[in-house]
Amino acid sequence: MVKKVAGKIAKKRIVGFDALKCFAIILVVIYHVFPGVFPGGFLAVEIFFAISGFLIVQKLIKTDWKEKEKFGDIKSFWQFFWGRLKRFLPTLLFCMILTLSLAYFADPDILTGARQNSLYAVTFSTNIMSIINGTTYENSLIPNFFNQTWFLALELQVCVVSYLVIAGFFQFLPIEKFKTRRRYKQLTAVCVLIAVLSFVLMAIYGGRFRLFDRAYFGIDSHIGAFFAGGALAAFSFAKKIVPAKKDKRWAWILLLILSIVGVGAMVPFINYASPETFVIALPMTTAASLVMIMSVLKLQNASGVKSKIIKVLEYVGTLSFAIYLLHYSLYIVLPSLLNFWPLEVIPYIVIVASVVLAILLQKVLMPFSVKHKVWFWLLLMLSLILPVMALIKAPDRSSIEESLNVVAENADETAKESVENVKIDYSGMVGVANTLNNDVMKYFDSATAYAKPYPVYIGGGITYSLSGRAYYNTPNYSRVSALNSARVMVLGDSVVVGATNAIYNTVSGAFVDALQSRNMTDAINLLAGYRAANGGKLPYVIVIGLVTNYVNFGVDTIRTIMDTAGPGHQFVFVTGYCGDYSREAQNNVLKWVANNYSNVRVADWVSVVVPNVNSYTYADHTHLTPAGRQAYANLINGVVSGL
């Protein structure tokens, strides 16, 4: 047990850390508001974690607890915990009140799930619920403007873990005067061990099992950077790190520059959904962050007047926490409110607004809350009116989710049961029963083929068996009669589901069959089933939009689709866009086929959506807003009208 830990709390701010935070927040903001520019911008979060770990562990070591107070008892723990909450809550509440107030006037879909998401935010459990619900930045069908609070939740949780670890360490190994440095070295080793174990778990979850969300949001797998920073803090006590001498500063300046450049060089090439990210990129970013922190410590008392640019960077760094919370929420809400502005201007408005509001909070509202407490609480109560109204107004399901639900219900039991009674003649379908270069294998021996599993080649000799696809690739036989009057048949996934009404209203003679979670191989059974049930006939033009859900396919898959439909058809394949999840390889397959087959066209949705991604898609940058649905229908109509 330790009655007193050496030293008092340091009052001096390490301003160099603020410059590092500025660098990190710039990468994070670009990652969010300019999708695709820096796909690895999320790596900068490790810089925040490493700095937080250094400062928190340093604070715990240097804290001079009050007389008779035990380090590790309930009272001291609550003081520490409440101190962290006081730092987080004002900015969090300001962000939530502002966002919900603006969202009240925006598209109602924006508010979908706002009650649950607000609860997760204020209880600091967003990261845990993201793992449980499987909803993140990249795959959320409807935008959650409090997604970014996962960082606060994880940091608060790891702060609690760090307190328990260090308190437990000092309980078992109290610091005595003649053992001080040895104890700090031992604490360094403990922090290093925890960091290494965390990175191992991250590599297992993200690298081995590809559970990217589990790896990124887990309290066990994403605390490596924090405890790596904590290890450096303990090491600084053991070795008594002091600023470098003047003639040695150039070396630390060079190391600082190289570490910043190293992180900057990774962000254009790293993608979130990649095993390499969790095995290599995140640990490397943490290592670079430690070099940055050490360099700042060595350069802390460097003589000379700082340039204005450095001072600006440091000032922005002091605002980084508020900017982090505000920019993502504004990025979700403002496009709906400013739909009369050019789309390319919105990201810049978001950035400027985030900085201005962060300054307003820090320089105006926080001082006002201290000097005029009565007026502040009165204004706070009044400011809750719109957020409460927004939460009451918030729907449980968005319009697109309702559409998906209706489509799923329409794929009723009658259609699924009828497959056992349908006899299909597969004669004349060239190559359908072959194993197509390990791309996809189909067993077309009877109608029960619909319910059979078929292997899909992933790569590296790995074959994954997709079973139970009958729900997705069984035709709706109750609608077969509509094929006789249709000129254009559209097969699609959830993206097409959203655009179904727009397609019917835009494309003359259209027949649409769309269902969520379909992939390109499902088109084979769908076409075979509809063809057999309709006397061997299908509409003249067949449009297929099945690139969104990732299943690797090759040219042979497309040939099989064409063979299954039979001769005399025109095919239109729609390219897929999934934000940070690349579909370039699959889209290139479609373009190759179009260049080599005269009856194949490509409707390049990617070229249409990328310049308009904020207005045509929801937060997942995949599923379509009302404007995007119409643009999707217009694209298809533009291609098929000339066939």
Image: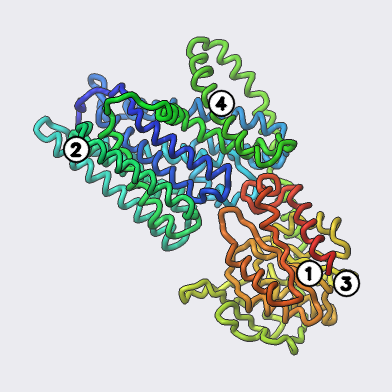
Per the rendering, the mark at residue 454 is none
Disc number for residue 356: 4
Residue named by callout 1: 476
- Which of disc 3 and disc 2 is earlier in sequence? 2
- Residue 599 picture quarter: bottom right
Examine the rendered structure and indicate whether residue 306 appears above or below residue 488: above
Q: Earlier in the sequence, mark 1 or mark 2?
A: 2
How far across and how far down the image is residue 322, in percent?
50, 30
Q: Which residue has dot 2 on it?
A: 184
Q: Earlier in the sequence, mark 1 or mark 3?
A: 1
What amino acid is at disc 1? Answer: Asn
In this picture, is 266 found above or below 331? below
Q: Residue furthest right?
A: 485
Tell me where residue 102 appears, x and y as whole percent.
Answer: 67, 30
* Three-letter code, disc 3: Ser
Label 4: which secondary element = helix
